[in-house]
Amino acid sequence: MFTTLVRKELRAVILSPKFAATFAVLSVLLLLSVYIGIQEYREGVKQYETATNLSDQRILEQTSWHNLYDKGYRSVDPMQVFVSGLGYDVGRWSEVSADNSVKLRNSAYSDDPVFAVFRFVDFAFIVQVVFALFAILFTYDAVNGEREQGTLRMVFANAVPRTQYLVAKCVGTWLGLVVPVCIPILLSLLLVMMFKIPLTGADWSKVVLLVGISILYISLFIVMGVFISSLTRRSSSSFLLSLVVWVVLVLIIPRASVMAAGQVVHVPQRAEIEGQRDGYAQDRWTQFYADMEKRLLDNARIDEDQATIGDDEFDEEAMWARMKEEDAARKLVQTEIEEYEARLLEDWRHRKETQQKLGLSLSRFSPASAYQLAAMTLAGTDISMKPRYESALNQYRNEFNSYVEENQSESGQVGGVMIQIGCEEGVKVGTSRENDGLDLSGRPTFTPPAQPLSEVVQPVVTDVGLLAFGIMFSFVGAFVSFRRNDLR
């Protein structure tokens, strides 16, 4: 009897007039989203390679260690073909130098704001929004529709347990919706292989997990639709209730949770942090220049005293010693400013992390949010992408600055300006005793951070568990509601 009920539901879904249109729309959307994602990925790789080559060429052309800087670029992950996440919102490069802190700049949406208005529609978005809506449209009248047609009494004229009936409803609808959709999903994966997107073994594992979580998410809305259908007596009421539930779970809760977290945990704007840093830096530099002026006056008196006693020979070593002293004082001020900025950013990051954790925890009451977070985590385009890259850039910044300071000290370029006046040579201005090309052998290079598969899967387990719990809760609710309802 169970097989008969499953076949009945499967036949009802496939022979439904809305099935062909739904299948066609979903197929076109999936294939189109993956194709656009492939083109965006290839364009992003070209931009990344061009930018890194230009940066390497620029740094090789430098002739002075003073104010030497580099740029670190964020690489393009091939998983962005399926889940764009925050890939277009986070900046694509950061300057790496002793004077400026790490900050990712020039995101794709900041360069082209029109794309921020009409955001990118990817595989995850289609599953999250469109699939969930279609699942509800096929199940809102699963139980009460048969009651209105009178077929429910005919089914239970036989010895059919209510649990078996509900399970057959869910399984038949699941087979009718999920199995056909696997065809465009497989075609999308074939499209990825045809364009030779460099997916590694770990990436293919992530793709399989993404498809599995997507099926779990669709299953939740199928069972939820059966639950709502068994909760109401009329299909018109269940249709309106299903739409309200879809709007609340997919659109309202994810956004309201972020707003609520922002009200509970106050986080200052990044501009406020930068303003505090700039104010402190201005005070320290003002004090530094005042002290430097005092030292210059003292050195001038010493030179006058030496000239008075007849020792007016130019002492180059003494001049370089004074320049090294000034350079050491300047570096001390820079270190103090960096330490102050680090303390400000640490407090800001702590507040931001607390706010984000609260917002994400509240948003997980929505299965749509749980699915989106899991998909973004698998693709590496989640909220941790920016701090992950900034941490790697800060580590590279320390290595790069140490490399520059070491070579600057060995070459004698201390960052000062030296002016020489001669009868034959005239006025000569330089930044060092020598002005040869730089030897950049052994220069560190920035390596984009990589995430092992184990680190990606671990946080996804929580979201998968929430989706599984939602399925069980919806089925139990459907069973309890169905037992209390009259079959007439």
Image: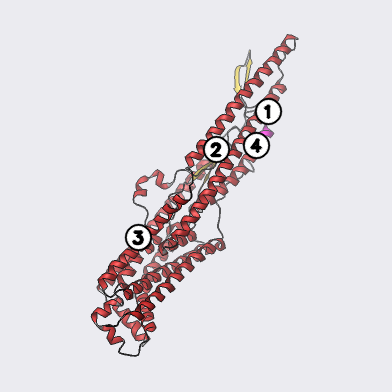
Amino acid marked by disc 2: Asn
Question: Which residue carries the number 2 mark?
Answer: 100
At numbered mark 1, what does the secondary structure look like: helix, strand or loop?
A: helix
Give the quarter of the figure containing the C terminus.
bottom left
Between the C-alphas of marks 2 and 1, the distance is 22 Å
Mark sitting earlier along the chain (1/3): 3
Q: Nearer the viewer, mark 2 or mark 4?
A: 2
Q: Nearer the viewer, residue 135 or 107?
A: 135
Q: Nearer the viewer, mark 2 or mark 3?
A: 2
The answer to whether residue 31 is seen in the rendering is no
Instruction: Relative to 178, say whether 82 is above or below.
Output: above
Counting from the top left corner in percent of width and height, residue 304 is at 70, 12
Residue that label 1 marks: 324
Q: Which residues are magenta?
A: 404-412
Residue identifier under label 4: 405
Name the kind of residue labelled 4 in the image: Glu
Label 3 sits on residue: 32
* Label 1 crowd bin: few (<14), some (14–19), many (20+), radius 10 Å: some
Measure the C-alpha gap from mark 1 to mark 4: 13 Å
Query: Is-magenta flag for residue 407?
Result: yes
